[in-house]
Image: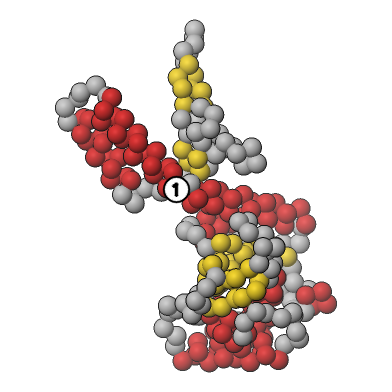
Amino acid sequence: MGKPLSKPSREQIAAVIAHARRSADRGPLPAKRAALLRAYCQDVADNDLLSTEPAYLAAAVLSHLSWGRKRRPGTAKIRIFNPERARDGWHSAHTVIQVVNDDMPFLVDSLTMCMNELGRGIEMMMHPLLKADRNRSGTLTGLAPNRRAASGRTESFIYMEIGKELDGGDLERIRQALEATLRDVRAAVEDWRPMLSEMRRGCEHIRNQAPPLPGILEESCALVDWLADDHFTLLGYREYRLRKGRDKDHLVPIVGSGLGLLRDDPDYPAHNLV
């Protein structure tokens, strides 16, 4: 459910919808515009919602929804650009970032941390969750507010504005950083259950194979059990073999054991976290 809306917020959203109805056609959307815009704006921070011109919000939201009509399944779609009236039908004093991704945990926090690391403050963010039906090519055949839809998969439509960035190279570097961040989030979320299973398997191995150390063994296993009970965010897993050397020993990764950020997938950039 969306947050309770104040009367000024409801009036502002109604004005946004009115502007959207009068706007130039930006391509058909597979749902009623009013319902989509209301769902999109429902959880926008009051200060952002009330301090932004309704016509501007309508153009920004319709741009994002229209651009998200096609997305390859299982991938993040990212666009960072400076809207121009002649090209895009609207203008912004900020650089705009639009993201469409399968809904999953940690998306907003991860993207916010990524932008902080890049030294780019986020001026405004909107993050509606919408139910999307797509065909095999990734084209939308249905889009509706998340809580009302009977079918479809929940997708995150994330909209951010940052300070104006005119350097094309910097825009591409920001896009690549956001893409890498979303790839990491997907890897960690998709492999969460296998990593949890490996953690519990490791705990059983300790119980059955470790030397009997009264107190220490029980405490160690209790800690692992506590971590596995949703008290720890698993990001990566990999097994290593200890290779004895003349001067020093080395940990050698076991091929095929990597999960999450430490996947062995050749298409996934390895994180050197040894």
Q: Nearer the viewer, residue 243 or 207?
A: 207
Asked whether residue 152 is in view, the answer is yes
Where does residue 85 sit, x and y in percent of width and height?
79, 78
Where does residue 62 sit, x and y in percent of width and height?
67, 78
Displayed quadrant of residue 1 = bottom left
Where does residue 15 sit, x and y in percent of width and height?
60, 91
Number of labels in the image equals: 1
Determine the residue positioned at 53% across, 48% down.
187
Residue farthest along the right direction in this orientation: 86
Q: Nearer the viewer, residue 4 or 259?
A: 259
Within 10 angstroms of label 1, few (less than 14), some, or many (20 or more) residues?
Answer: some
- In the displayed structure, would residue 146 be above or below residue 240? below
Residue farthest along the left direction in this orientation: 214
Where does residue 27 sit, x and y in percent of width and height?
74, 79
Q: Secondary structure at mark 1?
A: helix
Check disc 1 and report the residue beneath it: 192
Left or right position of 264 against 175: left
**Type of residue at label 1?**
Trp
Asked whether residue 123 is in view, the answer is no
Q: Nearer the viewer, residue 179 or 57?
A: 179
Left or right position of 118 against 251: right
Determine the residue positioned at 62% across, 42% down.
268
Determine the residue positioned at 53% across, 92% down.
11
Determine the residue positioned at 30% across, 40% down.
224
The structure's colour scheme is secondary structure
Left or right position of 274 against 220: right
